[in-house]
Amino acid sequence: MGKHSEKVILISGGSRGLGRGLVETMLKDGNRVATFSRASSSFVETCFQQYPDSFFWEAVDGSNTDGIKQFARMVMDRYARIDVLVNNAGIGTDGIITLMSEDDIRRILSVNLEAAIHLSRACLKSMMQQSSGCIVNISSVNALRGHSGVAVYSATKAALDGLTRSLARELGPLGIRVNSVAPGYFQSEMSEALTEAQQSRIVHRTPLGRLGTVDDLVGIIRFLISAEAGFITGQTIVVDGGLTC
Amino acid sequence: MENIEQTVFDVIAKVAEEKGLDLKTVGLTQKLVTDIGFKSIDLARIIAIMEIKLSVDPFSKLVPITSIQTVGDLCGAYQLCFADDGNSAYKPDFERSESRGEARLSSSRMHRGELRKKARTG
């Protein structure tokens, strides 16, 4: 078994994008991985076949608070502990704030922020019992810099960074670490919505001269949950190729 | 009910031992903070362990956490969860909880006032 193995890792929104990359890597590392998403996918089916004992998935909508809490309980029933939580599930909706529907605003707040709070609360019951554990919140460079058209999304991500710092203070005495990762623009379903011209502009403004990849992000998250990051808590690690430097 | 009490006692003893607190016996009248020496994070841990053991959290809706001062209060909160039709000898002290909450708010306001005064006077 490698140094990253044998943890019980709960990843919200693990059927595509960064969540999928995390699920794949963490399973390959020998961990037990639990994830939920709104609907199943061929990736989820493949994981069930390849890792019948160490993979667990349920259909849960990120805006369903009771469903999220129930999912955490199911993970506890199945694996008897939770070592790592990655609050990854999130949605982004573009639009000038006054033109957004109230329902859209409510949904972004619910999926991006409320779900992370409730899931953290549920998983912490296990981590507090163990006096060990690790939470990684997936934030965004939008939490650090102002960008037009993403006000509500940015607000939820900045709130996640606040949650990270406060929880790090609160839970440090119990040996539980909490950090954020703030990705810049990386190749995903979300960045596919950008036009070619928009992508070129971003690449041009990025010192490292490219969009990020899922692997760039998985690497840092893998490090943050490892023993090598044992003295890192309450931090927001920006992974954006230098875009915000 | 005795089982619940014993479970609470065991969890308190375990957490106290892990913290290196000098706790020879656990009794219903002992105050969790002033007598035993727990901090609020320890109480949160005790409640997390109890929830995993008993699958209930009386503090999510039923009982205000600020009403818990003694080991007996804690036992009572869990007994309330398992009492038929809420017929438990334990009644949470909502009044005490409110007054403690008020005291905290007022102390926090006073603290902020002192900080402002200090900042003005340099």
Image: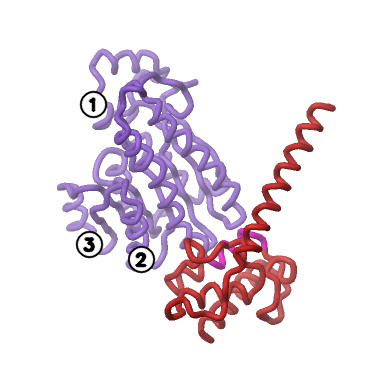
Check contact, mark 2 vs mark 3: CB within 8 A: no
Task: Assess disc 2: are there few (<14), some (14-19) or many (≥20) residues with their C-alpha within 10 Å of its C-alpha.
Answer: some
What's the residue type where badge 1 is placed?
Glu
Q: Residue at 30% across / 45% down in the picture?
A: A13
Give the Cα distance between marks 2 and 1: 36 Å
Q: Are marks 2 and 3 on the same chain?
A: yes
Residue A32 sits in quarter: bottom left
Question: Looking at the picture, does residue B51 appear above or below residue A204?
Answer: below
Residue B23 sits in quarter: bottom right
Chain for disc number 1: A
Q: Which residue is mark 3?
A: A52
Q: Which residue is mark 1?
A: A192
Magenta run includes residue A152 = no
What's the residue type where badge 3 is placed?
Pro
- Which mark's residue is nearer the viewer, 1 or 3? 1
Relative placement, left or right, of A49 versus A153 is left
Residue B26 drawn at (x, y percent): 67, 80
Q: Which residue is mark 2?
A: A79
Q: Are marks 2 and 1 on the same chain?
A: yes
